[in-house]
Image (cartoon, rainbow, N blue to C red):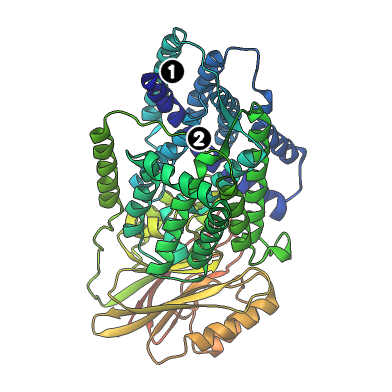
């Protein structure tokens, strides 16, 4: 019995892992499709068809066959997941769109068959898949290495090997007696699965998101979060679950209210506060929702397909609502500041089944306890090493400093290929010592959950200061190579999308230099108010470099006000051609600038890289 359970667990973990990756890819591709429909237009029939396919993929549990052997269903749809996972590695939006839909649809049928055949494996395999997902993302400094160039051959080999494993398992399972599932999903269980997946993919399983929420150290939180996620899989987990069940049976009301309130409270602390307290609170939130996960199963139910489909729809609803919390300025204004309430609703639903007074599903003890502990220890140690920051390439002071500004468009090229590596090369080839970055995501599912600021800083071995603007996970940043003295940021007056300014005081030789980055809004009135805030914020006597996407052309009031404030445009003052910067392909407008004050111009240029939807601007200035 244990042998068949372990083998099926391995297969389910692989299927669940590939599905988690497919969901992340699908929402990232959808972001580009919806973005173009909203800003470029029009809303074509193809966009509507894509969303209908999305709905059908998430409703696939309803199409799971009942008369076909569950073993055949598990085999066929696991093979479809393995096959569909291969094109996900290709950095092509079309290939990723259809392959992710295939994986998700196949997963829905597979998961339904698993719930009918071996339901107790479901929560355990899901947790194991989250552990594997965290590890692959740690390998790439938050950028899943299995979605990057160079992984395709490995993915083909892995998918083929897993296909062989599933076929072998099918051959063995045909000789085993048919199992009768005593557990399944009810309504609340299905909703809880959807809420749990939303929490994990939006926050709790992303160490970079936890670090940004708590303003903590990614290097510390990555292995800590992996350890917390591993706990339910380790020997002894069944004992603490049994103790929890005993407490729940003795005081069901206290247990239920306590579990829900503790989860909500810890998430709120993580959102509203910073530092160690917030980081620990978010880790505790992860522990609580993992504790509650097995209780999505209830005894004697055979409606798992229906309730899994309902949970999938709830997952979609939560994700779209959360997306509106980031894009409130262009969708529904009342979603501004709605991130925490949405997270709290998901936490309530995810923990509610465990708070109800009913029998808890058993947890089987698995053999090889020492091996399990050893594997867990190796994973945590490896994650600690991978998460540790590389040494910075600190630059010694020279006669001049090169400063750039770059709107990185959340890591996307104009055609919505994820080009973060190409952007890193653009910065590297520019020789910039300081770079102001705009449109920086640090853990959103719509940009592959990558922390753009952390990834670029580690890839280039530069220091980074990040200033969040919306829901902790999107904002602006400043990369630097000189010793940092201090840094601070400030939100700017914003009626539409929230913007900010970030400044770092750097020591360049024996001189202090203030380096500031900004992103101004889309409306003239907002930009005027925001620039007033910004000029007050950077008032001082030190030399200043001030870069960003100002969304203003040289004939605008913003340009004139900066000249009046004592800044100079290096292209004009140095006699260099002021080339346009947006869009990156066939640029027409000059809206990205690096302004200077108290420095003399040496060089100014606009590299011809089209990795983002804006071109980078680079200037060289002397402090002498």
Q: Is residue 116 above or below residue 503?
A: above
Label 1 neighbourhood size at 10 Å, few (<14), some (14-19), many (20+)? many
Q: Kindly identify the residue that appears in the image at 61 percent across and 28 percent down.
A: 300
* Count of numbered labels shown in the rendering: 2
Could you say where residue 288 lies in the image, as x and y percent from the top left?
A: 47, 52
Image quarter in which the C terminus is found: bottom left
- Disc 2 to disc 1: CB gap under 8 Å: no
- Mark in front: 2 vs 1: 2
Q: Secondary structure at mark 2?
A: loop
Could you say where residue 45 lies in the image, as x and y percent from the top left?
A: 77, 38
Taking 31 as reference, is 200 left or right? Answer: left
Which mark is first along the chain, 1 or 2?
1
Taking 581 as reference, is 305 left or right? Answer: right
Along the line of sight, the residue nearer the viewer: 210 or 101: 210
| Rendered image quadrant of residue 498 | bottom right
Taking 513 as reference, is 95 left or right? Answer: right
Can you identify the residue that label 1 sits on? 166
Image quarter in which the N terminus is found: top left
The residues tagged by marks 2 and 1 sit, at their Cα atoms, a distance apart of: 26 Å
Could you say where residue 514 lies in the image, as x and y percent from the top left?
A: 39, 81
Q: Kindly identify the residue that appears in the image at 61 percent across and 39 percent down.
A: 189
Direction front: furthest residue: 250
Can you identify the residue that label 2 sits on? 361
Could you say where residue 575 lies in the image, as x and y percent from the top left?
A: 46, 76
């Amino acid at each position: 019995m244990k042998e068949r359970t372990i083998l099926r667990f391995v297969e389910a973990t692989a299927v669940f892992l590939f599905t988690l990756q497919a969901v992340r890819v699908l929402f990232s591709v959808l972001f580009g499709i919806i973005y173009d429909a909203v800003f470029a237009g029009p809303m074509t029939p193809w966009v509507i068809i894509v969303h209908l396919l999305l709905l059908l993929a998430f409703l696939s549990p309803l199409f799971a066959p009942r008369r076909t052997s569950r073993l055949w269903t598990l085999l066929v749809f696991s093979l479809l997941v393995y096959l569909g996972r291969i094109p996900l590695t290709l950095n092509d939006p079309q290939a990723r769109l259809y392959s992710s839909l295939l994986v998700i649809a196949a997963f829905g049928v597979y998961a339904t068959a698993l719930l009918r055949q071996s339901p107790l494996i479901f929560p355990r395999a899901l947790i194991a898949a989250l552990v594997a997902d965290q590890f692959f993302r740690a390998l790439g400094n938050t950028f899943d290495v299995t979605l990057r160039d160079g992984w395709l051959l490995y993915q083909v080999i892995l998918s083929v090997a897993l296909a062989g494993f599933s076929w072998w398992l099918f051959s063995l399972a045909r000789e085993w007696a048919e199992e009768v599932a005593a557990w399944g999903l009810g309504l609340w269980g299905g909703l809880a699965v959807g809420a749990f997946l939303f929490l994990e993919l939006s926050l709790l399983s992303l160490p970079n998101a936890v670090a940004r929420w708590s303003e903590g150290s990614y290097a510390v939180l990555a292995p800590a979060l992996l350890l917390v996620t591993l706990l339910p899989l380790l020997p002894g987990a069944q004992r603490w679950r049994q103790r929890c069940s005993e407490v729940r049976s003795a005081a069901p009301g206290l247990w239920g209210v306590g579990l829900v309130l503790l989860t909500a409270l810890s998430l709120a602390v993580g959102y509203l506060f910073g530092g160690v307290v917030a980081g620990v609170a978010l880790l505790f939130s992860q522990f609580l929702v993992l504790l509650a996960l097995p209780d999505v199963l209830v005894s004697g139910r055979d409606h798992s397909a229906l309730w899994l489909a309902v949970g999938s729809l709830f997952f979609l609803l939560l994700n779209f609502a959360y997306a509106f919390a980031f894009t409130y300025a262009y969708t529904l204004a009342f979603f501004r500041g709605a991130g925490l309430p949405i997270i709290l609703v998901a936490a309530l639903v995810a923990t509610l089944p465990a708070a109800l007074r009913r029998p808890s599903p058993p947890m089987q003890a698995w053999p090889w306890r020492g091996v399990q502990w050893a594997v867990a220890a190796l994973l945590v140690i490896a994650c600690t090493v991978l998460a540790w920051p590389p040494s910075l390439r600190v630059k010694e002071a020279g006669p001049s400093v090169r400063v750039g500004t770059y709107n990185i468009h959340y890591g996307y090229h104009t055609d919505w290929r994820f080009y973060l590596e190409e952007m890193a090369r653009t910065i590297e080839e520019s020789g910039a010592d300081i770079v102001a970055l705009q449109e920086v995501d640090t853990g959103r599912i719509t940009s592959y959950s990558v922390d753009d600021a952390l990834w670029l800083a580690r890839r280039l071995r530069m220091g980074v200061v990040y200033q969040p603007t919306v829901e902790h996970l999107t904002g602006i940043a400043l990369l630097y190579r000189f010793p940092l003295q201090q840094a601070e940021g400030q939100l700017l007056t914003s009626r539409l999308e929230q913007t900010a300014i970030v400044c770092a005081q750097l020591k360049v030789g024996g001189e202090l230099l203030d380096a500031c980055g900004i992103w101004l809004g889309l409306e003239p009135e907002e930009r005027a108010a925001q620039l007033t805030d910004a000029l007050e914020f950077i008032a001082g006597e030190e030399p200043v470099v001030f870069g960003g996407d100002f969304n203003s052309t040289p004939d605008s009031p913003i340009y004139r006000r900066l000249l009046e404030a004592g800044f100079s445009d290096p292209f004009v003052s140095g006699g260099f051609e002021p080339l346009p910067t947006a869009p990156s392909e066939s640029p027409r407008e000059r809206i990205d600038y690096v302004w200077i004050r108290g420095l003399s111009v040496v060089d100014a240029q606009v590299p011809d890289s089209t990795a983002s939807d804006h071109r980078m601007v680079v200037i060289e200035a002397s402090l002498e």
